């Protein structure tokens, strides 16, 4: 905003100030009514503006709302989630990424960078969740390995993984156990031997 020179402002007050004061004295009641009307109109305008903002907030796209939910709530609570919940998140995110790819093929080239950024953001969240699954799977397998009576609440809904692991343990063929763990957790056999039997 441009600054008004002080000299110009002072000249305006000198020239028009006495006329404004005289008019206000002569028409004080009318001036006060006008100011009151303007003030009440401003309140109404503010209410309309506020309602418009609230209405626009309620129109948030479902995928954007889910993205915000993942960023603000879900990612912070990954440690407390069971495997079936984490698996559900990965399926949902993969579906969102497919939607973005489909939208990208059906839109103008101008929006391609926007779709690429959205896809990149979702892939970052997916990576975090997949890494959490890998870590938690590994921890749970380690607990099961060291205690036959250990019951994993984390694997509820994925008991087949636990049963297969226990069958491999009972056969006492260590290399098959290590191969299974390497496949399930993306860890190297060397790391698995170090963590599971201290080699």
Image: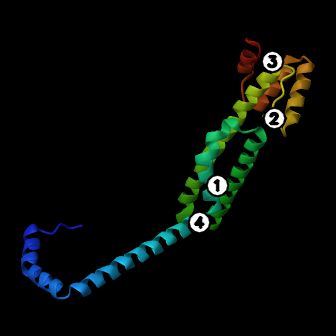
Quickly name the residue at label 2.
155
Q: Is residue 131 visible?
A: no
Q: CA distance from mark 1 to mark 2?
A: 25 Å
Q: Which is more toward the observer, 11 or 126?
A: 11
**Could you tell which of marks 1 and 3 lies nearer the N-terminus?**
1
Residue count near mark 2 (Cα–Cα under 10 Å), binned few <14, some 14–19, many ≥20: some
**Could you tell which of marks 4 and 3 lies nearer the N-terminus?**
4
Question: Residue 98's spot in the image, x, y percent?
Answer: 69, 56
Look at the numbered discs 2 and 4 and tell me whether their residues touch, using CB distance below 8 Å: no
Quickly name the residue at label 1.
66
**Could you tell which of marks 4 and 1 lies nearer the N-terminus?**
4
Q: Residue at x 24, y 84 (%)?
A: 31
Q: CA distance from mark 2 to mark 4?
A: 37 Å
Q: Is residue 36 above or below residue 123?
A: below
Quickly name the residue at label 4.
58
Q: Is residue 25 above or below residue 142?
A: below
**Could you tell which of marks 1 and 2 lies nearer the N-terminus?**
1
Disc 4 is placed on an element classified as: loop
């Amino acid at each position: 905003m441009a600054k008004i020179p002080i000299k110009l402002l002072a000249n305006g007050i000198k020239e028009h100030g006495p006329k404004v004061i005289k008019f206000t004295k002569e028409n004080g009641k009318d001036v006060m009514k006008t100011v009151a009307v303007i003030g009440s109109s401003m309140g109404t305008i503010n209410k309309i503006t506020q309602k418009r903002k609230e209405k626009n907030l309620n129109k948030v796209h479902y995928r954007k709302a889910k993205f915000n939910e993942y960023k603000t709530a879900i990612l912070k609570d990954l440690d407390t989630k069971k495997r079936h919940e984490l698996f559900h998140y990965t399926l949902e995110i993969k579906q969102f990424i497919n939607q973005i790819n489909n939208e990208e093929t059906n839109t103008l080239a101008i929006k391609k960078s926007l779709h690429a950024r959205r896809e990149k953001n979702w892939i970052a969240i997916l990576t975090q969740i997949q890494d959490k699954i890998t870590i938690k799977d590994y921890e749970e397998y380690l607990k099961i390995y060291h205690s036959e009576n250990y019951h994993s609440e984390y694997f509820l809904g994925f008991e087949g993984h636990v049963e297969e692991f226990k069958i491999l343990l009972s056969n006492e063929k260590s290399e098959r156990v290590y191969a299974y763990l390497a496949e399930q957790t993306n860890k190297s056999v060397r790391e698995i031997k170090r963590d599971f039997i201290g080699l």
